[in-house]
Image (cartoon, rainbow, N blue to C red):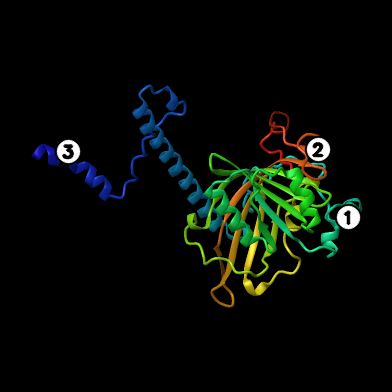
Amino acid sequence: MAGGGGGSGPVGSAAGDGAPPAPERVLFPPTFSVSEIKNKQRRHFMFLRWKQQQRKEKLAAKKKRRKEREALGDKAPPKAVPKTIENQRVYDETTVDPNDEEVAFDEATDEFAPYFNRQTVPKILITTSDRPRGRTVRFCEQLATVIPNSHVYYRRGLALKRIIPQCIARDFTDLIVINEDRKIPNGLVLSHLPDGPTAHFRMSSVRLRKEIKRRGKDPTEHVPEVILNNFTTRLGHSIGRMFAALFPHDPQFIGRQVATFHNQRDYIFFRFHRYIFKSEKKVGIQELGPRFTLKLRSLQKGTFDSKFGEYEWIHKRREMDTSRRKFHL
C-alpha cells in the first residue's frame, strides 16, 4: 500500500505545484490510414476516434484564433471568407446583367410577356401520369391549394397531345404533369400555353403535409407571395419566369403566405411557409407544405412533343458535369 501511495505522490505534487501538464499524446501518426485496418469493427471504431480528434483540433484552433483577435482588438485582420462551392463557381458567360438591353428586349417579346404585361390571368391544369396512386393524388391535391386558380384532372389514359388543345380552348395558361414511379412522384413536366416552352424536371424528396414536423394549419385561399432565388443565367431566368407565371400578380399580404423556389447548385427547392409575427420586430416562419426538390432535365421549345420537339437545352451528365463548380441555372 505504501508503495502504491508513494507512486501516486509525485504526480499529485506536480499537479499541485502548478507545473504545466504533459502534452497530450497524439492518437494517430501523420501517415495513419484507417483503410489499412483489416477488421471491420476495429476500422469503424478507429475512424470514429480519428473524427473525434479532428473535431478537437479544429475547435482548439478556432479558440486560439478568437483569443488572438480579442488581443489585437481593432488591429485584428479581417475574417477570411470561407471557400464554398457557390463562391468558387465557374463563371458562366450567360450570367444575366440586370442592365443588359438585349436581355430586356428578349424578355419583353418572349412567351411570358403577356403574363408580365398583365394581359393574361394564370389558370393552371394539374394532371398526372396514367393510373396515379394515392400518394401522387394527394400531392396533386395539396399542390392545387398552393397555386391559386389551379384545377386537378385525372387523365384516364388520355394522351398529352390531346389534352393540350383542350387546355388552350379552355383558356388554361399552364399545364403541370406529375409523373410517378413505384407509387412515388418522381417527375414534373411544366408546359406554358399556348406557345411553350416546356420544362421537364426530375422530382425528389417529396414530403406531404402530414409528413412535415411542426407544420402549421392548412393554407388559406389567399394569393401567396413568390420568391425566386439564385436564377442568374439566361436559362435560369427562363425557368424562373416559368414559375412566376404560375401565380397571380398581386399577392394578398393579409394571408401571410409565401411560396419559395430556391436554386442551389442547380437543385430547385420548393417550400411553402406562413409568416408568424411574434412582435413588432421579430418574425418567424412556419412551414405549411408540401415540399419537394426539382432538377432540370430539359427545356423544349413549344408545347410538349416527345418525338419531334426542338430542345433549347438538355442536361447531359457526362458532358456537362465535368466540374462540381459548374452550374447552369
The amino acid beneath tag 3 is Gly
Q: Where the C terminus falls, by quadrant?
A: top right
Looking at the image, can residue 50 be seen? yes
Disc 3 packing (10 Å; few <14; some 14–19; many ≥20): few
- Residue at 85% across / 52% down in the picture? 111
The amino acid beneath tag 1 is Ala
Q: What x and y, as percent, mark residue 128?
A: 64, 47
Left or right, residue 40 beside residue 210: left
Mark 3 residue element: helix
As drawn, 225 above or below 154: below
Marking on residue 73: none
Mark 1 residue element: helix
- The answer for how far apart the CA atoms under marks 3 and 1 are is 84 Å
Looking at the image, can residue 237 be seen? no
Q: Nearer the viewer, mark 3 or mark 1?
A: 1
- The answer for how far apart the CA atoms under marks 2 and 3 are is 87 Å
Give yes or no for contact between labels 2 and 3 (Cβ–Cβ under 8 Å).
Answer: no
Left or right, residue 95 beside residue 62: right
Mark with earlier residue (3, 1): 3
In the rendered image, which residue does mark 3 sit on? 7
Give yes or no for contact between labels 2 and 1 (Cβ–Cβ under 8 Å).
Answer: no
